[in-house]
């Protein structure tokens, strides 16, 4: 009889599942801690040792007082089978407020990932704060020379790439400043050719006179 007690206790422990418990599954979530505007945010989830499969996995970005920015769902069909949930980050950060900074303050985002059985029972939930950064382009600027003299041509090449390494397809404004920070030439709404912008500027004899 003494040997049966630990065996019965072990069986009860492994088969017990409290209603509403959020730790009935083991899971792994992979996502970047940085989000950028107008990009696709990828959350990869895998689970194992769950009571049943498939699982419905929902990822949700919220900002500005738990206001949902975007949410999406995917189905994990089997154990140890990663599934990606794609979220669309809106331009300008979705307009959520970070508090105390006015319209230009950065929104504070919370990523929430939940897993549910087909019956609707939640088996896990994870929440993390993610960092919003407005920069979403890599800009490379090169010129034909390092040092210029008066009345020499300045040839500029600007390359713009997105976070996916693809050419930027929008327009760009180009400003040329003198050593004191004054604008001596500007090009507005320039269209890029496969992410590349080319311009030429003739260095004047007296730049301050422009």
Image: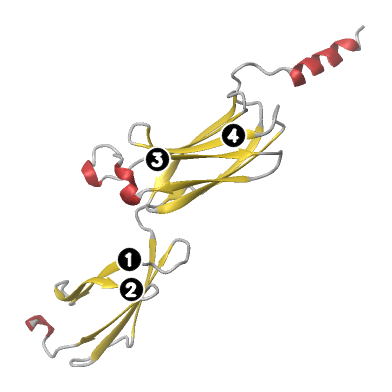
How far, Cα to Cα, is label 1 from label 3?
26 Å
Q: In the displayed structure, does residue 4 sit left or right of residue 122?
A: right
Image quadrant where one finds the C terminus: bottom left
Dot 1 alpha-carbon crowd within 10 angstroms: few under 14, some 14 to 19, many 20 or more: few
Compared across the picture, whether 202 is left or right of 158 comes to left
* Residue closer to the observer: 193 or 165: 193
Q: Residue furthest front?
A: 118
Residue 5 coordinates in the image, percent (x, y): 85, 10
Whichever of labels 2 and 1 marks the residue nearer the N terminus, that label is 1
Of all residues shown, which one is farthest toward the top? 1
How far is mark 1 from mark 4, CA to CA?
Answer: 37 Å
- Residue at point 59%, 19% (across, down): 20
Dividing the picture into quadrants, the one containing residue 1 is top right
Numbered disc 3: secondary structure:
strand
Closest to the observer, 20 or 192:
192
Q: For residue 201, what is the image quadrant?
A: bottom left
Q: Position of residue 148 (x, y in %)?
A: 25, 89
* Real-space CA distance between mark 2 and mark 1, rounded to the nearest whole angstrom: 7 Å
The structure residue drawn at horizontal position 33% and vertical position 51%, both measured from the top left corner, is 91
Q: Give coordinates of residue 126: x percent, y percent.
A: 53, 33
Front one among 145 and 139: 139
Q: Relative to 138, is 191 on the left or the right? A: left
The residues bearing labels 2 and 4 have C-alpha atoms spaced at a distance of 42 Å
Mark 4, residue position: 56
Depicted 14 relative to depicted 140: above or below: above
Crowding around mark 2 (Cα neighbors within 10 Å: few <14, some 14 to 19, many 20+) is some
Mark 2, residue position: 192
Which numbered marker is on residue 170? 1
Q: What is the CA distance from the residue labelled 4 to the residue labelled 3?
A: 22 Å
């Amino acid at each position: 009889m003494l040997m049966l007690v630990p065996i019965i206790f072990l069986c009860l422990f492994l088969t017990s599942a409290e209603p509403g418990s959020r730790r009935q599954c083991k899971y792994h979530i992979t996502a970047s801690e940085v989000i950028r505007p107008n990009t696709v945010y990828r959350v990869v989830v895998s689970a194992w040792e769950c009571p049943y499969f498939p699982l419905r996995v929902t990822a949700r970005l919220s900002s500005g007082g738990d206001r949902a920015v975007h949410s999406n769902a995917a189905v994990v069909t089997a154990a140890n089978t990663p599934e990606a949930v794609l979220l669309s980050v809106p331009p300008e950060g979705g307009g959520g407020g970070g508090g105390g900074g006015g319209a230009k303050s950065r929104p504070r985002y919370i990523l929430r990932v939940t897993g549910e059985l087909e019956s609707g029972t939640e088996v896990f939930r994870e929440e993390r704060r993610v960092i919003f950064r407005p920069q979403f382009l890599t800009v490379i600027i090169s010129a034909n020379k390092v040092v210029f003299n008066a009345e020499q041509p300045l040839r500029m090449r600007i390359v713009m790439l997105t976070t996916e390494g693809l050419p930027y397809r929008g327009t760009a404004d180009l400003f040329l400043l003198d050593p004191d920070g004054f604008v001596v030439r500007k090009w507005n709404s320039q269209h890029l050719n496969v992410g590349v912008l080319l311009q030429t500027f003739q260095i004047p004899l007296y730049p301050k006179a422009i």
